[in-house]
Image (tube, grey):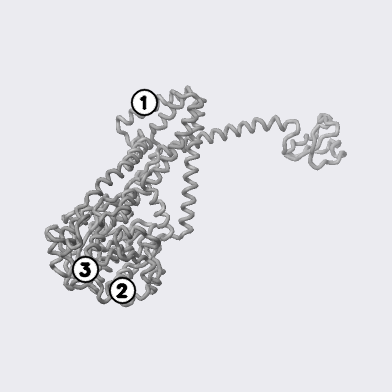
Amino acid sequence: MYSGVAEPYPSSSLSSPSISPLPPGDRGTLHRDGDPAAHPDVVPAARPSGRLRGEHVADRGPVRRTRRRAGARIADVLAFVLVLAVLLLPNRLGHLSPWVFVRLPIEGLAAVALVLLLPRRAGTVVAAVGGVLVGLLALGKVADLGFYEVLVRPFDPVLDWVLMRDGLEFLSASLGRPVAIAAAVAGSVLAVVVVLLTALAAVRLARLTRAHRGVAIRAVAGLTALWAGLAALGVDVAPHQPAAASSTAVPAYDRALQIAAGLRDRAAFARQSRVDAFAATPGNQLLTAVRGKNVLLAFVESYGRSSIEDPALAATVDPVLTAGTRRLRAAGFAAKSAFLTSPTVGGGSWYAHSTLASGLWIDNEQRYRTLVSSDRLTLDGAFERAGWRTVGVMPGVTGAWPEARFYGFDRVYDSHQLGYQGPHFSWAPMPDQYAMAALQRLELARAGHPPVFAEIPLVSSHTPWAPLPRLVGWNQLGNGSLFDTMAAGGATPAEVWRDAAKVRTAYAQSIAYSLSTLISYLQTYGDDNTVLVFLGDHQPAPIATANSPNRDVTVTIVARDPAVLARIAGWGWQDGLRPDPQAPVWRMDAFRDRFLTAFSPR
């Protein structure tokens, strides 16, 4: 007998033959005796929306099984898609397109074959370990995507971990500490999730393979033959993207070579650093040709060769150099310029600074840490040995800097000791003009001071190149608070970095500002005892150079005393602030020895 019904009709109405059947879909009620045949004009009550008590268990079982089967199929598909995507992911943004994910990965075929050959338990273990390794390699590819875009090289798993910290510091300075913390947390969680999901997906696919062993064997045989054919024919689905893919095997092999090379590099660098032609040279035999002069070494952040040779960038930078050459000549100065090849690009300025100072090629963190822990004679240390007061003006240093001892500075002024009370310009703690004015005020304007060697890395042309300051009168700088309106009214990094063309424009404007600062400084404060050496530390990130592979930077020496430039006449450097494409190109590690040789007794 049916148990619940809708609101009952009166029994008298059920017995009346004149009553029409209830409309379809309405609920009726049956006579108490439960016999519908006794009342042929009455429509039986519709089944309640809920399941009947007697059929509840019987109906739910098949539904649940159907749902589980559908869920399992979806999970299988998702596992396959995840593993395939991880295997085919390229390690360069320029190679990333939908087509890269429709290729045939040899690593996947090899993994399926291995699972089929191994016993069940061993196959599961191998699948789990392989999934973890593939997940880790995928994280390496993701790191490569960023490193190629900024530093134009792959991530080094042995030497580059410290750069992650520096990247977070850059985010903190540019976008705020909460953004940097959020990025660090999100990145860590995502890394763990990717590795875990890849391992689980690999185990699931291994079980699926064993469950359909016959189909899997035929599929592997056929697809392997297809892969070999595609590889032999050299079929590409897109530029640099062969249809027969090995997007994980090749990077894994390269990564293994990278690790081995990093481990060997320590011994090689130790051998190189033992050779130093000036290690035992006494101070009275060093730099005699510039005795009594203030020698200033200025690094212009990201002042790469592209800034004067890429037409889109040179349109902004070249006029500054041309006019600057003319203005300095009118003030009695002359200049010689050429190119140096930097050990880094896009970032890692400290590699360039230490390479120039030490005469050793510093292109990774292991070499840098080894160098600054040594007693290698630096260019700064040579000036100190020869009797100069050595000063480091470091507007970009915002915390402890223990490397100062290695360089041989008598005094270091970091960003907190320069008296600046104005705004930051994104990453740059202060404008270059203020930093140069602080050097003049704190050291060079003091009466009776000894000759000074000063190193000053200028930071206004540091990425993200927005907002940018403008030159003001040198007597207007004060404590820097006049820059408040410039920082507040300038473009933000978010506004600039939406468009690659805007990024290139902002970069060129930042270089023009830094160069204009140096030219104006020489016009204002330079004299017969001033020698200025300025150069770039590295090319900017590829987004600013239209992916130029060039690693050269411009280097210039300016002096009013003609005897200074006469000492480098044999170098073949070109007159003026702008070298042309035929100017000499040296490796940056050659500069120290050539400079010390040119300006020391012959």
Give, as a three-letter code, the residue at label 1: Ala
Q: Nearer the viewer, mark 3 or mark 2?
A: 2
First in sequence, mark 3 or 1: give its number: 1
Rendering coords of residue 533 (x, y %):
22, 63
Q: SS of the residue at dot 1?
A: helix
Q: Residues within 10 Å of mark 1 (few under 14, many from 20)?
A: few
Is residue 232 left or right of 111 when viewed as pictured? left
Rendering coords of residue 464 (x, y %):
37, 59
Give residue 441's mark. Answer: 2
Instruction: Return the residue nearer the eye: 526 or 399.
Output: 399
Q: Is residue 409 above or below residue 106?
A: below
Q: Is residue 45 above or below residue 537?
A: above
First in sequence, mark 1 or 2: give its number: 1
Query: Most extreme residue toward the right, as rendered?
Result: 12
Give, as a three-letter code, the residue at label 2: Arg
Instruction: Return the residue nearer the eye: 323 or 51.
Output: 323
Residue at image mark 3: 324
Q: Quadrant of the N terminus?
A: top right
Q: Is residue 364 visible?
A: yes
Rendering coords of residue 484 (x, y %):
40, 71
Give, as a three-letter code, the residue at label 3: Gly
Q: Residues within 10 Å of mark 2 (few under 14, many from 20)?
A: few
- For residue 404, which quarter of the picture? bottom left
Give residue 289's mark. Answer: none
Residue drawn at x 39%, y 57% is 498
Residue at image mark 1: 225
